[in-house]
C-alpha cells in the first residue's frame, strides 16, 4: 500500500483527474449502449464529467483538449440515442 501511495504522490494531479474523467466517459458510454439505453444513468455520468472538464478547464493541462473532445462526442451520442428512443416503450 505504501508503494501505491508513493507512486500516486509522484503522479501529477491533472493526470489522475483526467483518468477519472475517462472513467466517467466509459460509464456513460456503457449506459448508452445498453438495450434499452439507461438515459438517466448516462446523463448523470456525462454531467459529472462535464463538471470536471468544464470546471477545471486549463488546470487539466495537456489532457484538456482530449477531454473536451470526448465530452463533445459523448453529448452528441446522448442526444442521438435519446431522440431515437423517445418513442420506444419502457422496458
Image (cartoon, rainbow, N blue to C red):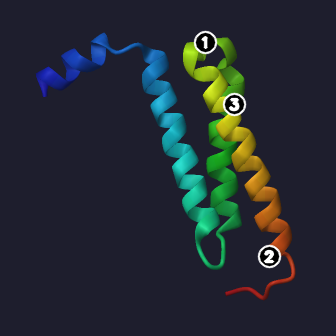
Residue ID at (73%, 86%)? 90
Residue 52 visible: no
Residue ID at (52%, 39%)? 22
Mark 2, secondary structure of its residue: helix
Nearer to us in this view, 80 or 88: 80
Mark 3, residue position: 68
Q: Is residue 46 above or below residue 36?
A: above
Residue ID at (56%, 15%)? 62
**Tags 2 and 1 touching, CB below 8 Å:** no
**Tags 2 and 3 touching, CB below 8 Å:** no
For marks 3 and 1, the one nearer the N-term is 1
Q: Is residue 39 above or below residue 48?
A: below
- Whole-number angstrom distance, CA of label 2 to CA of label 3: 26 Å
For marks 2 and 3, the one nearer the N-term is 3
Q: Position of residue 66 (x, y in %)?
A: 62, 29
Residue 33 visible: yes
Tag 2: Cα neighbours inside 10 Å, few (<14), some, or many (≥20)?
A: some
Q: Position of residue 30 (x, y in %)?
A: 55, 61
Which image quarter is the N terminus in? top left
Residue ID at (48%, 35%)? 20
Q: Quadrant of residue 91?
A: bottom right
Nearer to us in this view, 77 or 82: 77
Mark 2, residue position: 85
Mark 1, residue position: 59
Mark 3, secondary structure of its residue: helix
Tag 1: Cα neighbours inside 10 Å, few (<14), some, or many (≥20)?
A: few
Q: Is residue 33 above or below residue 46?
A: below
Tag 3: Cα neighbours inside 10 Å, few (<14), some, or many (≥20)?
A: some
Q: Quadrant of residue 64?
A: top right
Q: Quadrant of residue 68?
A: top right
- Whole-number angstrom distance, CA of label 3 to CA of label 1: 13 Å
- Whole-number angstrom distance, CA of label 2 to CA of label 1: 37 Å
Amino acid at each position: 500500500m505504501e508503494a501505491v501511495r508513493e507512486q500516486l504522490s509522484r503522479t501529477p494531479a491533472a493526470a489522475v483527474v483526467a483518468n477519472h474523467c475517462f472513467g466517467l466517459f466509459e460509464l456513460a458510454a456503457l449506459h448508452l449502449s445498453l438495450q434499452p439505453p439507461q438515459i438517466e444513468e448516462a446523463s448523470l455520468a456525462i454531467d459529472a464529467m462535464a463538471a470536471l472538464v468544464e470546471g477545471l478547464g486549463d488546470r487539466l493541462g495537456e489532457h484538456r483538449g482530449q477531454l473536451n473532445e470526448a465530452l463533445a462526442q459523448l453529448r452528441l451520442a446522448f442526444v442521438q440515442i435519446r431522440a431515437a428512443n423517445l418513442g420506444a416503450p419502457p422496458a
